Amino acid sequence: SQQGEEDPQALSIQEGENATMNCSYKTSINNLQWYRQNSGRGLVHLILIRSNEREKHSGRLRVTLDTSKKSSSLLITASRAADTASYFCAPISNFGNEKLTFGTGTRLTIIP
Amino acid sequence: KAGVTQTPRYLIKTRGQQVTLSCSPISGHRSVSWYQQTPGQGLQFLFEYFSETQRNKGNFPGRFSGRQFSNSRSEMNVSTLELGDSALYLCASSTLVGDNSPLHFGNGTRLTVT
C-alpha cells in the first residue's frame, strides 16, 4: 500500500473563498479517496475518483486526478466555517486486499 | 442505518495496565480496520479484520492485538500500556476487503495513559 502526501500542511482562507489542496503519490493507482476529519472525531469519506476519471464533482467539492503526474487536487468552493477540518487523501494501488493508509493531511481553517 | 460505534469514548489508564476498546461496525459491513492517531505520528494503521480473520497488520508491537467476532464486532487490546500509547483510536468499517470500498469511521476512543 502507499500513502499520499498532502500539500500544503496548513491553509487559512476567508469564508467564501475557494480552498485547494493537493495530494501526490508514488505508484500507479486503482482509485484515490479523499476524507475529512473534524477535530477529535473520525474521518468522513468525501469522494472517490477512479484512475480512468479526470474530474469528479460532489456539491461544492471538485476533485481532479492527473495520473501522469501522480497527483490529485481537492477544491472546495465558497468555503464555510463548517469546512474547517483536516483533509486526507488515500491512494489505492491496483492490488486487492490493500489497507488504506493516510498521510498527515492538510489542516484547513476558514476565517469567518 | 446506525454508524460505526466505538466504546468507550474516553479512557484514562495507568502505565502497565491493559485496555480493551470496542467497535461495532455498520450493519452488513464485514471488514473492520483500526487506526491510531497521535499528533506526532499522524494516522497509523494497526490492523484489519474480515470474517474473523486478520487480513492486514501495521507495524506495531505485539502488545497491540485485536479480534473480530462472528457478528463483525471487533475489539482491540493493548497490554502493558506505555505513555506513548496515549492517542485517539479509530475504528472503520467497510463492506468488503480488497474492493477499495470507502471506509466509515467511528468517532474514536480517546485513550490517555498516565
Image (cartoon, coloured by chain):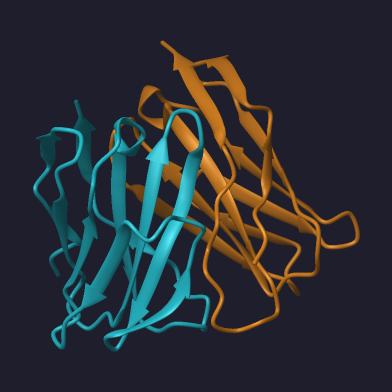
Chain colours: A orange, B cyan
Q: Nearer the viewer, residue A84 or B93?
A: B93
Task: Left or right? Give the position of A45 relative to A101.
Answer: left
Residue B99: x and y, percent?
51, 83
Vertical position of residue B33 compared to residue A46: above or below:
below
Residue A87: x and y, percent?
52, 39
Q: Nearer the viewer, residue B83 or B55?
A: B83
Task: Left or right? Give the position of B78 relative to A24.
Answer: left
Q: Nearer the viewer, residue B28 or B16?
A: B16
Residue A67: x and y, percent?
83, 63
Vertical position of residue B44 compared to residue A98: above or below:
above
Task: Left or right? Give the position of B85 relative to A67.
Answer: left
Q: How many numbered markers are drawn? A: 0
Q: Which quadrant: the N terminus of chain A?
A: bottom right
Vertical position of residue B22 compared to residue B111: above or below:
below
Task: Left or right? Give the position of B31 relative to B41.
Answer: left
Where on the picture, by quarter, is residue B12? top left
Residue plotted at (63% across, 40% down) = A75
Q: Which quadrant: the C terminus of chain A?
A: top left
Residue A18: x and y, percent?
61, 28
Residue plotted at (53% across, 63% down) = A100
Where on the picture, by quarter, is residue A26? bottom right
